[in-house]
Structure formats: structure tokens, C-alpha cells
Amino acid sequence: MTQFSVPWQPKPARTNLGVPGKAIAVGFVLLLVATLGWSLANSVFEGHPIAILLLVVGPVVTAFKAFALAMVVKTWRGWGEFLFRNALMILVGAVVSVCVGVFLVNLLFGWVSTDFVAQADDPSVSTYFGGALSMGEVTAALPWLPGWLAILLWPLQFPLVRDLTSLGALAGFFNIIPVYLIWWERKVAGRIQSRLGPMRVGGWHGWAQTFADGIKLVLKEDLVPKDADAPLFRIAPYFALIPSLLAFLALPLGATYVFRELDVAIVFVLSMLGVEVVGVIIAGWASNNKWSVYGAMREACQMVSYEIPMGMTLLIPIVCVGSMSLRTIAEAQSGGWFTWLAFSNPFAFLGFIGYFVASLASCKRAPFDLPEAESELVAGFHTEYSGFRWSLFFFAEYAAMFVVCALAVILFLGGWNSPLPLSWGDQITALVGNEVIARGINGVLFSGPIWLVLKAVFFLYVQIWLRWTLPRIRLDQVLYACVQVLLPLSMVLLLGNAVWVLIDTTGGEGWQLFSDVWNWILGALGIGAALTFPAVAAYGFYHRRRMVGCLAVDAMPAS
Amino acid sequence: MAPEEICKLLKTEFGEAIEDAVVEGGHPYVQVQPGRWREIAGFLCNDARLWFNLLRSITALDLLADNKLACIYDVMCIPLDQGAELVTETCEFAVRVVVDRDHAELPSVADIWPAADWHEREAYDMMGIHFADHPDLRRILCPDDWVGFPLRKDYEFPLEYHDIPATTEYELPNPRH
Amino acid sequence: MADTVVQLESTPDILVDHTSGMQGDLRTEEMLVNMGPQHPSTHGVLRIVLRTDGEMVLEAVPHIGYLHRCAEKIGENIHPYQYVPYTDRMDYLAGMNNNQGFAIAVERLCGLEVPARAQAIRVIVCEMNRIASHLVALGTYGLDMGAFTPFLYCFREREMILDLLEAICGARLTYSYITVGGVHDDLPIGWIDRCGEFLDYFEPKISDYNNLLSFNHIFVKRTSKVGVISAHDAIAFGLTGPMIRGSGVRWDLRKIQPYDGYEKYDFDVPIARPGGTDEIPHGVIVGDSWSRYYVRVLEMEQSVRIVRQAMAQLPDGDIQAPKLKNLKLPDDEVYVEVENPRGQLGFYVRGDGSAIPSRVKARGPSFCNLCITQAICKDILLADVPAIIGSMDVVMGEVDR
């Protein structure tokens, strides 16, 4: 921005240091604190790990961050250009390193909780803070580890510390999913509608657009209408957000990538998705706006009715496997794509489709987006919301979308298992020898959270695709589709599946053949459908200049 | 049916009620007595020979020189007995009803042609012609509390409306808009 | 809901009172809801006061006038040449057609002869504008039904038409191109080729819209049997254009009272047909919202035909009647209607011997089409209100003038 300098006015002297100067000053102060802390911890606290963490490690890490911030701000133009030019590389690198990091931390946690703590000489010996191991035991157990690293490892023996770390990672995942889902939805919508979508922010295809939007939303005024019920109005977005966050607690992303493994995880996740409606109803009611009330009532009506067929279809995999633990259900499908439950029998296959439709309705995605139907209800239940609270609704919605898709994948489509049988993975483990590398290969090729996320993202794509293609249906048709079509269908499917499973366990040779034939037919159908997508995408990419309704038309007439 | 024939037919049917008939010019019309206008309207709409079932427009006129207001009803015939065939023949006509400026009141024809509903409201709003027995005679384009009838030739523009200035030329003796 | 539909089907006379839609213990407290003037699906500043019972709309009363700009009063104060730019601000989606309507009215009043080339150019640009206007109608109707994508497809093609019209007259929305006595400029060199190229590109797109929106099952379910208007009611309420053709009356001023040489072109007048015939989906009945929508799709095809013919037989010659320096309007009056994309646009112009008309009255087709709202929006679902309003394709600039 151009500064107009007026000759007869003296330039104001620069008194403040600016961000880089402040950051450097803070960094130096922290380094000083750390140096003093080192002597203090050694002399007064006799090198106790807590003291060292608080007095030395904390200040050093913060000082490092301050120096990094100062560097970035000070040389912003250089950094900015670098970031923009290499945005794609940075994005990919960040994703890969996050994956690797999560993998390593997971390994570490597993090792700490199973081997390290259990191998302690005398777990009953307690230190100041209730942990089982003293610092000396840690260094004794790991003689090759430098002392300062042992200090970092020491707190991990407390389950609380491990839980808090995992919760932080979970919250990060929960935040990053809506951010990229919104960006991706806008890109997909743009492509479907023969335009580009966000292109500017972040350099590469506007990948940072949602971050920019988020900053804007946080800075916007948090408006509460005059006649609204202010406390309820303020609290409603959290009622929508927190259940969908809680659903992640029991949602396993991989065999060991789960915060709390519940025996009834499926019930927990489903109930959390059901609780989300409370926030919407409170929001609609507290807004004191007639359109909002309409949105809330529609949401209540739609959610409550679609919960039933959704639950019914979810019972199908439970009947097949005989467990309500998501981990058990997913592990039952680890023998390659034809063991996935959706392909196990025709009833389960239709049940999967029924579940997907019901999950669209319960996530209020098009064509069931009646609660926020903009052409009818302005914006439905969030008409009066603005800024941060408004964005919380979107976080909740997109996170819930991910949850239902992940649930579909876990229950019907093999969860975190890749289409290849897991038994091959064991052979590779034997071949490689090194356990860590073998586990890494296993996770990428056979069974890891990557597969769950990829499959879930595919179904998210289907949701987005449907939303930008289909018109919205009417309320009476929504209820007709639920009560008169989906509900009887899901009952029939549940019954048929139960009978099928019963005969499967008791049936003779002929039945086994019949069952296997169905299994292979459905499996071929599924793999065919899955392969069609890349084929169509490749076709579209190859013919991208000739496709009707496509962005790139060689010569636009009249242009 | 040619305008002359329509005029003749109306004259034989209603005699005195037809005050004038203009068949030359771009817009042939008959002028009828306001008192018998409803009767004539019903005849125009329902008579099998005329069948003017489409009321196209009601134009309110200010005849300031004669101290009169007039309403021109443009009607048209859409034959409905042809099924899905293309309608090729039609007939159009106009009726003029003149009333005093001071007692501008006409019978409403909104029950004969429902289309007249909004047209009459517009004529009332803009020209101040009252339509007796109109189902819902309110202003339609102007706000309900607007003063005066804007399309009358002697209408004076307000200089402000609810403290909103309506002109920037307050200083001039005759502010324009 | 099902009961209401049956009622409408069996008693097409919509003046029958339907207030007994829901009965007994299902009736809840009634609520007045203000739909508009700022609402995403009222296409501008239409305000509809809904009396609702839950999701049921018992009554809908439209309130208009939020965009009133005294167009008729202005017409009494300026010369007809100057008034042309005011006309394309009425129906701002079909500026050419509005220009044409007013120009023809003044030409008839003054007895001006328009040269054949000017007439043909008028037909070309008006039909192009009709396509553009119908594209907006299609797209926004899809938007009202919650389908966002057809809207952008329609606007993509509309942009090309606007580019073409911009090449002619420099404006993209308010053209003021058709003037009293002819058109303002001749077509640019090469314009005919570009226009033909566009028509070749555009014609297959119509089937795209059909596949994406018109025959979409959800869309048909949403719009069929909604807002049914019988032919008798359509005429009684003064509906014209796609509204009356959507009720099954083959009525088009371009055929019945041809102006600007429309008699020279071969084209059909599409009307609504009942579901099950040809490509019309099952469940559609004549006079419902889907029929009105589909008539517009078919009209675009006919407009393409007309433009092709007009371009093929474009005569040479003047584009403007001999300019009258001091055009005086005779002491006469004239009422002329032309076929606008939305219906019959009428202009009443009355001269008094001076250059300035003593009365200009515009009969907006949207204004007349909208007046049926209250009669048909009875005992419907809330989601049907946008379906009905959208199928009318009102432009508030013309309703309020």
C-alpha cells in the first residue's frame, strides 16, 4: 500500500519492534530461562523429569517456534513466493509426513504401553506423579538413548499423556477433514458446472481457500438477533459440533488407530450422530425466525425417520459377523475384496445401498437437504447465524459426512483392509524381516488407515456428486421414501440376511456353492463399479477438450 | 368479426348505453355508459358471437380538459373449441368508459374477468378510479399510505416521503424529480 | 398432499375454495410467514405473505410494487425515441422484445413503414433474446428446485448470446437497439456466421438440459401436478405466453397477428401435452408447472428455427425508416401487443398532436401472469410455492414497472 508522505509533517518515529523483533526478543528470553532452568533443575530438583520438561524443554521448544516465526515474517516475500510456487509439493509432503508421523507415533505408543511399561522391573514403585517408572529406570531400559530424549519419553508412560496426545491428533484430524472436504466439494462442484472453483488462495488450485474463509468467518461479527433466545442461540452450534467430534472417539481408522475401542462402537457412533439433531433444533428454535423453525422441524422429522432404516441396515453386518465392535467387523473382512460384507449376499448388498441413502438423509445432504433448502427456507436453521458459529454447523455437517461414510466402509466394504488379502501381508512381513518397515509396507498395501480414508473419501465424492446433480425432493416425498420404501425394504433385507446367514452356517454343499456364486457375482459387480470410475475419469481426461459441458472447449462460439 | 359489426351488435343489444363508437384509427372502441358497463361486460365475455374471454389490459386515462377520467378495456377472443389446434382466428376490441373526475367510480368486472382484479387495482392506485364491489381494492404499486394518484395530470409530486427526500432541488420554485 | 392433488385434478376450476385441506386433530396453529421481498426464490423483490399450517400453505397473497419506477409517468414526459431505453428496463431479461413492442406501437401510431431488413434483424435479435430469457427461466427454475448445475449450464450459453448481442449494440442487458422505425445499427461483418456457429453449438445443448433437468425423476415429481391451471382459468386470469400454452392452448401472437414479418417464417407453437405421450414423462398433466417449464424448452428450439430462417433470407436494404426529424404523434391512440418471452407485452400509446405522448401504458405479461398466484397457491406444501412462482417466470422489473 502506498503511504502518502506529506513534507510538512515529520515522519512518526518507529517505536515498536514489529512482529519479528518481538518474536526474536521472546526467543532470547526463553533461551535465557531455559539456561537458568537447566542449572535450577539439576541443583534444586535433582534432575527430575517434570522439572526439566517445564523449565528447559518447554522454553527451548517455544523459543525455537518464536525464531521460526520471526524468520517467516521477516523474510515473508521470499517465503511467500516459495510457498506459492511449491504449494502442491508442500501439501503432498505435509500429508505424507503426517501419515509417517502418525505411523511412528502409533508405533511408539504401542511399544510404550505394551512393552516398555510392562517390562519395568517393579511397576508398583511410584514416583512423585503416580507413574510406574522413574527416570533412572527409563535410562536403564534404554541405554542407547541420549539422556535428553529419555526425558521426552518419560511422560509417555502416563496413559493420560498418551490420551491427550491422541486427542490432539484426533481434533486435528477432525478439523482438517471439513476444511479439505469443503475445498474439494467446491472444486468438484466447479468441475461439474464447467467452471474452475477456487483458484487463487494458496497457489495451487486454491488449496488454502477454506483456511482463508475460516479466518474471515472467525473475524466476522458474532451476531445474535435481538429477540433470539441468546443463551440457547449461542450454545446451539456446540450441540451440533460436539456429538460429531465424539463420534470420532469410537471410530476406528485402523486396527490400532482408535482412541477408545468400544464393544458397542457402532451403537455409540450412531447415537452420537443422532444427538446432533438436538443442536439443529435448538438453533432453529432459538433464532426466533420462522424460516429457522421450519428448518429445525424438517430436520427433526427427517432425522428421526431416517434413523430407523439406517439402524436396520446397520444391523445387517452385525448379524453377519456377530459382533458390535467395529474392529471385529472390519477384521472379519480382511481376506480380500470378495470377503467384504457388502458382497457376501444380495441382501447385504442392497442393505449397503439402503444405508447409503439413509445416511444421505441423516447428513441432510442433497437430495435430502430440506432443513437448509435455500430456495424454500432461505437458509433453514442457520439463517440467523454468522461468522464462527455458522462455521461450526458446517464443521459438524462435514465431519458427520465423513463419519457416516467411514461407517459404511467399515461395516460393508472392508474397513481399513485393502482389496488384497491380509494373509499376503504376513508373507511380506516374513520376507522383509525388519518389523517396523514390514508394518509400514503392510499399512500402505494391505491394512491401514489410508485405505479407510481413501474409501470414505470416495463415498464423500459420491455424496458431493449427487448434491450437484440432483434437485431437492419435497418433504412429503422424503417421508414417503422413508416410511413406505426404505423402512419396509430394510426390514425385508434384515430378515433375508438373517435367514441367509442362518442357512450359511447350517447349509449343505449345494447351498455353499450357491452362496459362493452369489458372493463372486456381487464381488465382480463391486470391483467392476469401482474400476469404472477410474476408467470414466481417464476417458474424460483424455477427451477433455471434446466433452460436452466440460470446461475446456477448443473454440467457444461467439467468444 | 370486424369492429363495425361489433359496434352494430352492441348498439342493437344495448341501444342507449352505447354513447359513442369509433371504428377508424388504430384503436377501434365503443364508449359505454358507466351504469350499464357490467351488463355489457358480461355480454362481451359470455355471448357466443363475441366471446371476448381474454381481458388484455385496463388503461386508465386522464382527460383533464373535459374534467373526466376514462378506463379503456382491451379485450380479445381466444376460441377454446379447437382443442390442440393452432388458434388462427381472433378478434380484438376495446371499450371505453368515461366517468367524472370528482366521482370517479365504476363497477368492478373482476368477477367477469378475474384478470381485471390487478388491473383495476392499478387503475385505482395510479388514477384514483374506485371500482365498486372489487374484492380487494388496495393500492398495488405504491405504498398503502401514499397520497394522491400519480398518473393524474394534475398530480403534484411530494417533496418527501417519510422523511426521505424525494428531490434534490428544494431551492427551485418548481422542483423536478 | 395426495388429497389436494386429486382435488385439483378432478376440479380444475381453481376458484373453488380448498380451505378444508387438513382436518380434525391434524390442524395446528396457523402462522403468517413473509416470503420476500428478499428471498432466494422470489426472483427479485416479490413479497408473498403465506398463511401456513405447518408445512401446508393455506393462502398466499402476493404484494408487489417494490421495484416501481414510474415508467408510465416518465413516458408522458419524454419523446418516444427517448422512451425506448426505459422499456428494456422493464423486462430486463428480454430487452429486445420490449424495445420491439414499444417501437411497433409508435410505428403503428405514426404510420411508419419499417424496412424489410430491419424487420428481419428485429426478428433475429428478438428470438435470440427469447432464447436467452428462456435460458434464465430454465436455470433459475432448476435453482428453485435445488438443482444448481443446470443454472450454470444455462448461463454459459446465455453468456454467448449476450456476447453476440453485445457485438451488435454494445450492451449486454439493456440494449435499446430496436428503435422507432427500425433498428439502430446494421449487423457487424461476420456476425451471421458467428450466430450460425452458436446455433449449431446450442441446439444439442437443449437435449443436455432435458437429460439433466427436464426428465430428471425428482424434478418431474416435484413439478408435475403442482399449480395446475386449466385452459379456461388461464384465459380468465389473462395469462399469456408459455403460461397459456402450458395449459394446452395453442395461442401465439406471432402466428395470429404476425408483426415484423413473422408470417414469413415456418415454426411451430409448442403446447403442453399430457404425460405418457411421446417423451413427456408419466404423471405430468396439462397445465402444471412442469408443462409450463417444458413449453419454454420447446420454444427455444422453435426460436432457433426462426433465427436460422431469418438469417438465411436476410434481405438487403435500409435498417431504418426515413428518419423523421420532428416526429409528431397524431391525435390518435393505439394498443399493440407483441409476443414477449413471458407472454403478450402490450403498449397503449396515445398522442395528442405534439411530440410527447399524453399517455403510455405498458401491459406487462409478468404482471398479468402473477395475478393468478393467490388463486392457485392454496393448500399446497411450502416447497410448492417456489415451484409455482418459478414456473411463472416473473420478472419483477416488469411487474412493478
Image: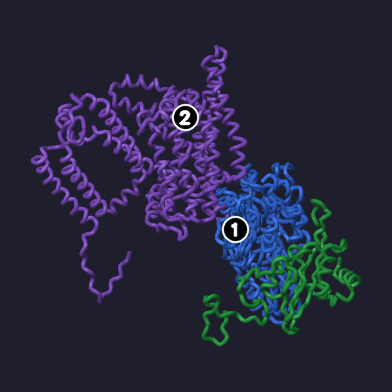
Which amino acid, mark 1?
Leu
Q: What is the x, y in percent for residue A427?
A: 36, 19
Q: Looking at the figure, which quarter contains the C terminus of chain C?
A: bottom right
Q: Which chain is green?
A: B
Mark 1 lies on residue: C32
Q: What is the x, y in percent for residue A5?
A: 28, 71
Which amino acid, mark 2?
Leu
Chain C hue? blue
Real-space CA distance between mark 2 and mark 1, rounded to the nearest whole angstrom: 46 Å
Q: Residue at x 68, y 50 (%)?
A: C21
Mark 2 lies on residue: A411
Q: Residue at x 70, y 59 (%)?
A: C372
Relative depth, front residue between C379 and B19: C379
Report the disc number at residue A119.
none
Above or below residue B125? Residue C144 is: above
Q: Chain of mark 1?
A: C
